[in-house]
Image (tube, coloured by chain):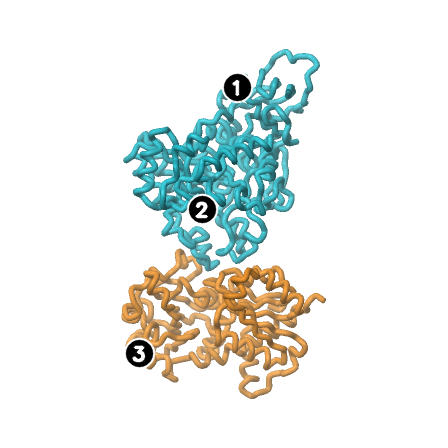
Amino acid sequence: MPHARHLLAIEGMHPPEITELLDVAEAYALLNRSGKAPRDLLRGKTLINLFFEDSTRTRTSFELAGKRLGADVINMAVSASSVSKGETLLDTASTLNAMQCDLLAVRHAQSGAPALLAQKVDASVINAGDGTHEHPTQALLDALTIRRRKGGLENITVAICGDIAHSRVARSNIFALTALGARVRLIGPPTLIPAEIEQLGVTVFHTMEQGLPGTDIVMMLRLQKERMTSGLVPSAREFFRRYGLDHARLALAKPDALVMHPGPMNRGVEIDSAVADDPQRSLIREQVEMGVAVRMAVLDLLSRSHTRNV
Amino acid sequence: MSDLLISNVRLLDPATGLDEPGALLIRDGRIADFGRFAPPENIPTFDGQNAALCPGLVDLRARLGEPGFEYRETIESAAQAAAAGGITTLAALPDSAPAIDDPALVHLLRARGAQTGNLTIHPYGALTRGCRGTDMAELFLLHEAGAVAFTDGSRALANARLLRLALSYTKSFGARIVQHPEEPTLAEAGCATEGELATRLGLPAIPAAAEAIQVARDIALAELTGGAIHFSPVSTAAALALIRDAKQRGVNVTCDTAPPYFDLNETAIGDYRTYAKLTPPLRRDADRQATAAALADGTIDAIVSDHTPLDADDKRLPFAQANAGGTGLATLLGVTLAQYHGGHLTLLQALALLTEKPARLLDLAAGRLVRGAQADCCLFHPDRIWQVQSGKLPGKAQNTPFDGRALEGRVTATFKAGKQVFG
């Protein structure tokens, strides 16, 4: 990480790089709680949140992370209309270069879009979620949350459940968790498990009853409504019947198993409210808190390694 | 007119198995003699310097940019690229804008090819109006105007009833239907071959079986109707096995492939390299090897360039949004010869797939060394090394999937109707 210019994917990162990032993030988590984050660290630097897809949670988290470190933060929500006017991603890159931005958090509906942008902009690019490819900061915050609660990731068993095929969160988590020594299981219907994902070092299950026993962490993924209309899943209620997480299903996992969700949740589709809101079992709130800390660490480390060409 | 003696060459003609040193004499743009003969006096002479001389290459699948996409390529620039690739005869796909679904457009393309002086253009006719897959085009009128076969280009005709009717109807005047082998509902929105790589990259994927499914259905329709079907380009072991088997049963089925499918595999798309985004998508290595093996065993009838000119704005996009296709005219011979250098094909086998066999498939008067025929020839050094570089290719379009590839085998001169058009 100290030598990296961009954060585009977890795949390819070495375990010590991930660990270093988590260590820095953990320090920021403590500083945030005591209100002592270094407010001048990124003074004079500009962070642009370039979001081609709607997002409240991730954009706000990056915004807060940048502001807590003293950066100037601009949010650019690029609506579908300006894209349809013909401005290409590379036109956008050229605009951003002229604005002399230092850090760029990009969310885009297309896999590989931040990597394409990174080839053309002077700023450090942070992938804030691209298509069905990766969402690196989400995986880092998930890893940090687990590490704090379980004391480490070695030999921890994590079950990622639901729509794996369309999930950038799942891919980044698979790469991060396996790199750090955790065992990863995927649970979902065959229509939502992408081809040959076992090659990524995970075990695939098609029922919660088979996949959950022995797990320390149950990570639920959002199931989007369009999956029902495109025939991947017959209906929301059928999905919940087979893969929805309620307390009865959670009891299949280890007695101290904890529940995670990257948000936004579809209550009653993939997760029951009683589980999501259970302070004893749900880490969902803590994930949001760690999200800010992880993004502060990423901004800090990337701006250490990279000074914009002027 | 053009009289020329091309001396000191290794004459190669796959149609007759000819492979011997000699010379070739051109009178009035036609082949007057070749082999060992006493050269006439006072004739302009081109010293071949022991290079190989074969019939001008015949490419059965290329897009020209015209009409409709002149910002990508023009007939003029495509003709330059073809000449640099040793190609003197080319069949142009009809999915242009407008589509070649009217006899007047067939006449236009033929005339524009003749105007270049480099290249004979044989247009394909659209199989359906506008290549939209719904209404049959005026196939006989297109045929009469000179359309060499019928296809909707890189769109497979999905409607089984319509394909059945087209196969029966074209049988009455001996025309062939060329089908893009990709089952459209399985291929919809996909941009990479399904498997570990597409899963890692998070790209919408197409199962390799989409090809075999289309091929299996269409072979059944060819058997039902007795019509002639040609699949282009084929890229999977499963589809090739079906075609091999159907040929043995005597079904009127043929196929071709393009160099990327026997020279590259899916890893070429690496970190979202859009120049390697093709349709069908690049396959895994086992399919690449099966495609190469099918060149040698005769299952594949021709190697085509599948030249698809695109410009930077078509390609500098996120992978799934980028246009599919690569240039192929200038690299057709060099990449094909890699199969010869690798010991998988003899030199004559490799050249047959680029000359006599494709010409025979569409009944074209090309692709052979025949006394009295138009003198279309390609002079090349089988061992000369060069490197493919996007940005430095002949012609306008630069979107080669082979950027950086070192090749052995370079065209040094091309002759069209006895006139030197390249080198």
Residue A96 location (% of width, % of height) = 63, 67
Residue under circle 2?
Answer: B280
Q: Amino acid at mark 2?
A: Pro
Residue under circle 1?
Answer: B370
Tell me how far mark 1 sits from mark 2, CA to CA: 36 Å
Chain letter for mark 2: B
Residue B152 location (% of width, % of height) = 42, 42
Asked whether the viewer can see residue A35, the reply is: yes
Q: Colour of chain B?
A: cyan
Q: Amino acid at mark 1?
A: Val
Chain letter for mark 1: B
Q: Colour of chain A?
A: orange
Residue ranking furthest to the bottom: A34
Asked whether the viewer can see residue B259, the reply is: no
- Check if mark 3's residue and mark 2's residue have beta carbons within 8 Å: no
Please tell me whether mark 1 sits on a helix, a strand or a loop. loop
User: Which mark's residue is nearer the viewer, 1 or 3?
Assistant: 1
Position of B88 with respect to A154 (left or right) is: right
Q: Amino acid at mark 3?
A: His
Residue B120 location (% of width, % of height) = 54, 30
Q: Write down the quadrant of residue B162 in the picture.
A: top left
The residue lying at 58 percent from left, 41 percent from top is: B74
